[in-house]
Amino acid sequence: MAALSGRYMEFHEVHGANVRIDPTGTQATRVESFANGVCFSKQPLLPGELFLVEIEEKELGWCGHLRVGLTSIDPRSLEVVPEYSLPDLVSLGDSWIFAITRNHNRAPPEEGEEEEGGSRRSKDFFTASHLLIGSMRIPMDKLVGRSRPGRFSHILDDLYKTNALPPTARRSRIGVLYVPRAQGTADMHIVINGEDMGPCSRGIPTHQPLYAVVDVFAATKSVRLVQLEYGFASLQTLCRQIIQKHIVHRTAIAWLDLPQLFKHVCMYE
């Protein structure tokens, strides 16, 4: 995982007509209608690298939610970004995209292979430091979203951690990655709030770069990229984890004698 260290994730400058990317390149907001919200990762993903977004804003009145996946189409080669990821982008070929639902689409296990991922959680889910997908080790620290601090935030936090809320709720964190397999192919996995949903596409060719696809569609209005740390955790992360471990509830962080910016990090991550 050392090769993944230090990569700053951003959205590509090529995107759907109704999407606006903020100056940091990390927030994508659909400003009109319910479609034309297709976005791509700025760089092709590395094997095992998770492209993770948090749903920041919803919009009532539309049917449908976030869609994510992979494509080997270079966004710069598109004369016009398709209106929809499903079916428009997929119909161009070399794209594997799924709508996010609680009962996620999963590829059946191959012959002689045990079923993996899905709704089952290991007994050490709440204490594990990493999510294990094949030989990939993904830090768990930022995989689960958190509510905004408030009167009932402790209840919401428990709901997020246990995935009791719909996967498309505000603060849910959804990511996509690919795991190399034999003969130049890979499996695509989708991770929802720290849970590996299992391989949803198999046999994806890896001879071409693979870009992440995020379709800010319908009821999902705005998403923000979450930066992950691979390898050793930063000093800031270690300090935050210790502080959170020794407080009754994270709203109490507001009363600590800490720099305001660091208190913000401790409360919201």
Image (cartoon, rainbow, N blue to C red):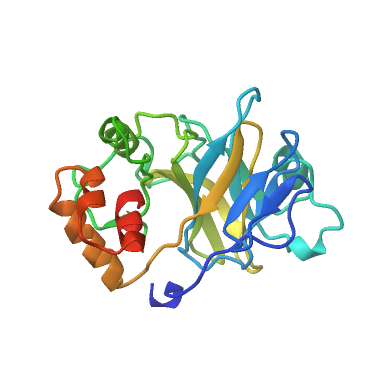
Q: Residue 193 in the image: state x and y as whole percent.
A: 39, 43
Q: Nearer the viewer, residue 261 or 238?
A: 261
Q: Residue 246 in the image: state x and y as whole percent.
A: 12, 53
Visible residue check, residue 139: no
Visible residue check, residue 27: yes
Kindly indicate the quadrant of the structure image that contains residue 64.
Answer: top right
Marks counted in the figure total 0
Q: Quadrant of the N terminus?
A: bottom left
**167 to 133, vertically: above or below:** above
Relative to 31, 195 lies left or right: left
Q: Residue drawn 21% across and 51% down? A: 255
**43 to 15, vertically: above or below:** below
Relative to 155, 104 lies left or right: right
Q: Residue 186 in the image: state x and y as whole percent.
A: 53, 59
Q: Nearer the viewer, residue 122 or 140?
A: 140
Q: Residue drawn 47% across and 63% down? A: 49
Q: Residue 184 in the image: state x and y as whole percent.
A: 56, 66
Q: Nearer the viewer, residue 250 or 39?
A: 250
**173 to 217, vertically: above or below:** below
Kindly indicate the quadrant of the structure image that contains residue 216.
Answer: top right
Q: Residue drawn 23% across and 66% down? A: 238
